[in-house]
Structures are given as structure tokens and as C-alpha cells.
Amino acid sequence: MFKHAIVRKPCKNFQFGISTSNLGKPDYQRALLQHSKYVEALIKCNLSVLELNEDSRFPDSTFVEDTAIVDEAFAVTTNFGVKSRQGEQIEIKDKLKTFYNTLESIRNPGTLEGGDIMKVEEHYYIGLSNRTNDEGANQLKRILKRYGYSSTTVPLKKVLHLKTGISYLGDAILLVSGEFKNHPDFRKYNLIEVQESEVYATNSLRVNKYVLIPKGYVNLKKQLLNFSFRVIELEMSEFEKMDGGLSCLSLRF
Ligand code: GLY
């Protein structure tokens, strides 16, 4: 069970973050409203939420998931593979010190971002992306091994981060789209395939008894209800414009 979440409000420079979506400029007031609904949903999932103030130095800083890997017994701050986000992890590190006795970190020349890390029970998958390199992955693997976890790397073909195209929902069930539909590493799981027109919703998020999904993805919602998941739908349009999904908006531990 997750008990805590850390989130950060989108900042006034949110529109200047990295985006490949071609969906237009985000509406800042709408982004703030969508973010507040996201926080409410985490509270409904029984999490105690630490909400950090906006940080206009970093347009993408609302996507806190990329700053750290957080587990029960350890936390690892990351090292961004993209220049405009380097430094986002510094304040997060300070905050994590109130929850963890020891903190690990990924260091140069290793780069690694939290969106590339997916935990499935006692195993971690590490996406090798444009943001996470072999050295970063190897540093994380060594840390995970010390804490008793196995890990494997997954070279990515098209997606920004690993969890752009695959999400773990618990109970050996994975949501998959695109390059992960027939991926040999994930055949052993129970796969829910997200159809091409709903690909954004692949980044859905299991939090305790609920699955958070972006609003408006009717086929996925139906599929999840067939599996008896309790679904919470959230408007995510302004974050989608900036290449961000549901998992990106929080650290959960
Ligand atoms: N806009 C989120 C990212 O590219 O990291």
C-alpha cells in the first residue's frame, strides 16, 4: 500500500516545457484545476499528499515522478538526461530526507529519469531511452541489488519514457500499447492492450484500491471495469499537451 505522495503545482512557465505533442499551448488555469483534482484523487486513494510550491525555473517541474525512484526502504534521486530539467531533483532530495534515512543518487555520466522505471512486484524494468543511458541503468541496478530487487533493461524504440507505453496495474496485469504489445519481456503477464486511438491512456496509474485513468478513454474504461478495477477518471488535457501522463505527476511511496 502507498501511504504518501509528493506532487508539485504546475508553474507559470509550464507552457515552455518540453513537448512533442503538437496539441497546442496548455491553458495554465485549466492545468492548475486539473492538478488540484489529481491531488483530490490521491487523497481519495488514502494518500497523504505533500504539495510543493511551483518552481518557475523548471517548466516541467510538475512532472515530479522523473526526479526519484521511491520504494519502501530506499529512495534514489535521478540525474536528468535533458538539460532543461537538470536540478529539479535537488529540492525533492531535501523533501525525501524527511521520509528516508539514506538517499541514493544517480550520478554523471549516468542519466536516468523516473518515467523510465517500472516496478512489477519484486522486479524493476528500466527503460533505456533518450533520457536514461546504460550507465544510469547500471548504477540503479547496483542499488536495487543491494536492496534485494532484480532488474532488467528494456531498450525503447519510440516512446518518450518506458511508462509512456506500459503500466503495471498490480495482480500481474499490465496495460500495454505500441511497441510493448508483443514484447517478449512482458508476455508472461496478463496484458490489457490499449487501442491505438487511446494510446495516451496507457499511462494510467494504480494507487491502492483505485486505478486513475485520463478522462474520455471509453474503451479502456470498459476494459478495466471488466477486470473489476475501481476507476477514477481525471481530465488530463493540459498535461497531455506537455507530454505528461498520470504517473508523471506524483511520487508515490
Ligand atoms: N515534458 C515532459 C518531459 O519531456 O520531460
Image (cartoon, helix red, strand yellow):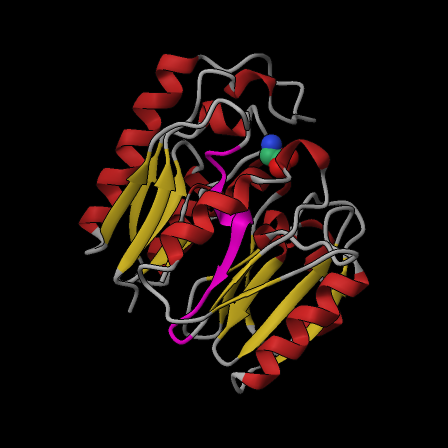
Task: Indicate the quadrant where residue 218 lies.
Answer: top left
Q: Residue at x 41, y 51 (%)?
A: 94
Where residue 156 sits: x, y (%)? 77, 55
Residue found at x 46% / y 34%: 62
Between 211 and 253, the residue placed more toward the observer is: 253
Q: In this view, does 202 lie above or below 75?
A: above
Q: In x, y percent, where is residue 66?
A: 55, 48
Residue 91 counted in the magenta span: no
Give the image quadrant in which the ligand numbered 1 is located: top right
In-image side of 130 versus 186 (left or right): right
Please tell me which residue lies in front, 105 or 50: 105
Residue 245 in view, yes or no: yes
* Image spot of residue 230 (x, y percent): 27, 55
Q: Position of residue 28 (x, y in %)?
A: 42, 14
The boundaries of the magenta stretch are: 61-73
Would you say residue 67 sits in the magenta stretch?
yes
